[in-house]
Image (tube, grey):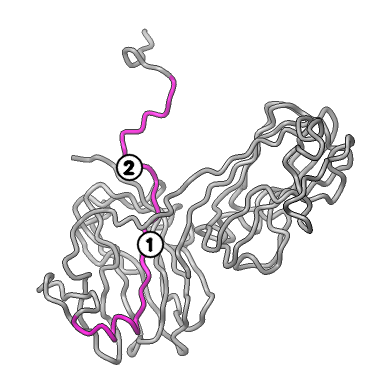
Amino acid sequence: MATYQWKGAGYGLPIVGGGSIILQRKIDIPTIIAAGAKGGLALVATPNDGSALATTGFGAADILEVFWVPKGTIVKKCGVYVITGEGGVATIDIGVSSATETEDAADANGWLDDFDLQTAGVTGATTDATLTMGDDAVPGGELYITNGSIDILFNTALTAVAVFVVWADVSWLDIT
Amino acid sequence: MATYQWKGAGYGLPITSGGAMRLQKKIDLPAIIAGGADGGLALVAAPTVGSALATTGFTSADILEAFWVPKGTLVRKVGVYVITGEGGAATIDIGCCSATQTEDETADDDGWINAFDLQTAGVTIANTDATLAFGDDTIPGGVLYITNGSIDITFNTALTAAAIFVIWADVAWLNIE
C-alpha cells in the first residue's frame, strides 16, 4: 500500500465553486394576478410568452417550477414562510415532478408535504425523518443528474391571496 | 442582574469569515494513470515529486489524501457521485487516517463513508447521521480538525483503475487559533 497526496498540496480549503447558498423567491400571487400576462409566468409549452394567471389564482394540481437548477445541484432542504395568509385552507407540496431529473424518482412532496398557506407568519421546512428527500432518506441532499426544477404543487383550488417566500438550501457539484 | 449587548451593535449577520462551503474534487483514475508522473499525485514522503500511479491503479489499503484542510476546518458531511463506474467491485472508505488531526484524536478511516462501491455509474452516497462515527448524530456540528490535516480515501479493493468519481465535503472554518 501507499499513501498519496496531490503533488505540491498545501493546507487550505480548495474551493472549486458551488458553496452552499440559499435560493429564495417571493411568490406574491395578488401581484402576479394583477399584472396579467406581464405577471412573470409562462406555460412550459411556450416559455417565452407571458401567461396571465386567472383571477381565481392557482388551481388544484397546478405546478409552479419555482427554481430552475442546473445538473449537479444538491438540494438539502426547502422551506416556506407565509407573509400574507390565504385566509382559507390552501396547501402546497414542494418536490420534483419529473422522474428523470434527480437521482431518485419523481416526488411532488419530497421536501414539503401539505404545507398550509392559510395563515401569515407560519413557516415550514423539510424534516429529516419523514420525507423522502429529507436528510435521513437522502443524506447529503438530493442530487439533480440533469437540469431540472424545484416545483411547487398547489393542492387547493382558488389559491389567489397568499404572499409567501419559498427557499432552498443548495450547493453545486461538477458531475460533468 | 443586567443584560448586556455588544457596544454599538446593529442587526446583521455577524460573519467573520468561514461560511459553509462545498469542497469538490473529480478523481479521474484513467487520466491520473495516463498522466504518469504528471498525473497530479505525490507520495507523502516526497510531496513535491510527481508519482506515477501504476496502470493497475490504486490497490488495496492505498490512501489518497483527497482534501488537505487547515486547522479549524469543520467537516459536516462527505459524499461521492460516480461518473464512470469501475465495472467490478471497488469499494472505498472516506475518513481521517490520522489519530491526531481531529477533535476525536482517533483515526477513523471510514468515519464518513464506509465501503462505498465505485462499480456503477450514476450511484451517489453521503454519510448518514446515525450510523457512522463522524455522522451528525455522533458529532453534532461536524468533525473539527484541531491541526492541519486531510480527508482521506482508503481504497479497499485492488485494481481500482477505471472509475471516475466526484468526492465532496461540506465544510466550514472556525478560527481556533
Q: Residue at x 79, y 52 (%)?
A: A43
- Element under disc 1: strand
Q: Which residues are magenta?
A: B11-37
Q: What residue is disc 1 on?
A: B24
Vertical arrangement, residue A80 with respect to residue B166, above or below: above
- Element under disc 2: loop
Labelled disc at residue B75: none
Q: Residue at x 44, y 20 (%)?
A: B11
Q: Amino acid at mark 1?
A: Gln
Q: Residue at x 38, y 76 (%)?
A: B92
Dot 1 crowding, Cα within 10 Å, few <14, some 14–19, many 20+:
many
**Left-right relation of B70 to B77:** left
Dot 2 crowding, Cα within 10 Å, few <14, some 14–19, many 20+:
some
* Coordinates of residue A52 in the picture (x, y in percent): 83, 41
Q: What residue is disc 2 on?
A: B18
In-front residue for pair A64/A3: A64
The chain identifier of the residue carrying mark 2 reads B
Q: Amino acid at mark 2?
A: Gly
Q: Is residue B44 magenta?
A: no
Q: Are marks 2 and 1 on the same chain?
A: yes
Q: Earlier in the sequence, mark 2 or mark 1?
A: 2
